[in-house]
Image (tube, helix red, strand yellow):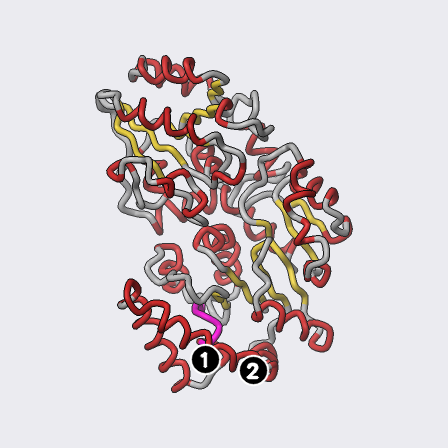
Amino acid sequence: MFCFFFRRLNDLDQIAPLVFEYSKNNNHKDVFYICTNNDLDFESNKIAKFLLKNGVKMGYLHNFLLKQHEIIFLDIIFRLKKIFYKHLGSFFGKIINKCYQTLNNKNLYIKFLEKNQISTLIFDYPSDFNHIIKTFITLKKDLKFKIIGIEHGILSYKNFTDYKKKETQYENCEYKDFDKIIVPNELSKKKLIYLGYDLKKISVAGCPRFTSVWNFVLRKKIFTNLNISVSQKKIKIVFMDHSSKYGVIEDNYLNLIKFINQQNHIDFKIKPNTSNQNNSAVSSKNIPEELISNNDSINLIDWSDIVICINSSIIFDAILNDKIFYYPKYFHKQEMEWDNDPCCIQFKREIDLFDNIQNLNREILFKLKKSINKKNILERNVFLGKKDDENFLKNYINQNLN
C-alpha cells in the first residue's frame, strides 16, 4: 500500500489526482494522505473534503499513530488553536509541538507501517525535512519500504546557473535516501543533474495535476459552483501573484496594477501566492485590498477572460482551459519555458502591454484566442507523448509508483 504526505495546500493540490486515482483503484479504503505541517489548516479545503468523502484517510500524523483518547485531546488543542489563532495561537502551538515530541518514538511509526502494510511513502519534493520525514528515513533500511518524491508544480525557469548558488542546502541532504524523484519535464531533470542528483533516481513523467481527466474532476465534482465567464462589456483579468524572490521587478508589477485599476472597462482581481504570501508583492501592502481575491485559483481562472502570469505553474491550468495568457516578459530577466511560445501573448515593453489593455474589447479577445496554440507547451511539460485520456493517472501510477 502507498502512503501519501503533504505540507502545504498547493502541494495537496498537486498530488491529489494520484491519491484519488489510487484510492479509486483500491476500492476507496486504507489510503492515507497525511499532513506533515502542524500549522496548516486544510480541513476547509475543497479538494481535501472531496478526498475524505471518497474514502481517503486524511489527517495530521497523530491521527494515525496515537491511541483514541490521545487523538481526541490533540484534536481539541488543534481546534482551540484555530479558534483563538490571533491571541492564543502560539500558546496552543507550543502545546501541540510538545505533544508531538512524543511521536519521536520509532515504535509508533513501525506499528503504523506494519499494521497498514505500507510499502511506499510518497512525499512532495522538495520537502521540509522535519522530524517526521527524518524518522521515516531512519526506518527505511530495516522495514524495506520505498520513499518517492514528486516535484511540486512544473519548473519553468531555463537559467539553471542561479540554482547552484541558491540551493546548496540540497547537496548533502536526505534526498540521497529517496529511491526516486519524479519530475514533470526535461527541464527539471536537467536542473537536478546540474545540482548533483543521481541520474538513475530521476524519472520524467509529466504532470497529473494539469491533465484533462483531473481537470474534469476539479470542475465537475469539486468546484461545482463556478462563476463561469459570460459575454459582457467588462473584460475580466486575473493576475496570478507569485514569490518576489524569483527576481520579479516589483515597480513594474505595481505600475501595472495601478494602470489596470484605472481602466473602467476592466474587472480586475489579484490572486496571492498560496505557498508563501510573505514573499509576494501582495505582502508589500502597496496594493489596494479590494483587488486581492482569496477565492480558489480554479474559480478565478474560470471567471477570467485573461490571466496574467510571470512564473507560476498555475498558468498551466489556464492554458489547459483555453484562457488567454498574458506574459509581461519585461517584469524580470529570467528565461522561461513559455518565452516566445504561442501559448501566450508576450510583452517585452510596458507601453505595449498598457496600450493593449487600454484598447481591449470582445472582438480583440476573440482574435487573441484564435491566435493561441497550447499544444506544444502542454506536450513538453504535462503529457510527454502520453495520451491525455481517462487512463493517464492510472498509467502514471503503474509506470512510476509501483
Q: Residue at the location (68% across, 66% down)? A: 146
Instruction: Name which residue lies at 63% across and 55% down.
Output: 398
**Magenta stretch prevailing secondary structure:** strand
Task: Measuring from the top left, give residue 47's x and y in whole percent.
Answer: 39, 55
Q: Secondary structure at mark 1?
A: helix
Residue 61 is one of the magenta-drawn residues: yes
Name the mark on residue 99.
1
260 on left or right of 318: left
Quadrant placement of the C terminus: bottom right
Eyeballing the image, is 374 above or below 104? above
Residue tagged 2: 108
* In the foreground, 48 or 217: 48
Residue 271: x, y in percent? 36, 40
Determine whether label 1 and label 2 are within 8 Å by CB.
no
Q: x%, y% of residue 269? A: 30, 34
Magenta stretch: give its range.
57-62
Occupied quadrant, residue 107 = bottom right
Number of numbered discs overlaid on the protein picture: 2
Pick whichever, 99 or 63, lies toward us. Answer: 99
Q: Which residue is depicted at the point 62% across and 56% down?
A: 149
Say few, some or many: other residues with alpha carbon within 10 Å of mark 2 (under 14 / 14 to 19 / 20 or more): some
Q: Can the viewer see residue 33 in this picture?
A: no
Q: Nearer the viewer, residue 193 or 89?
A: 89
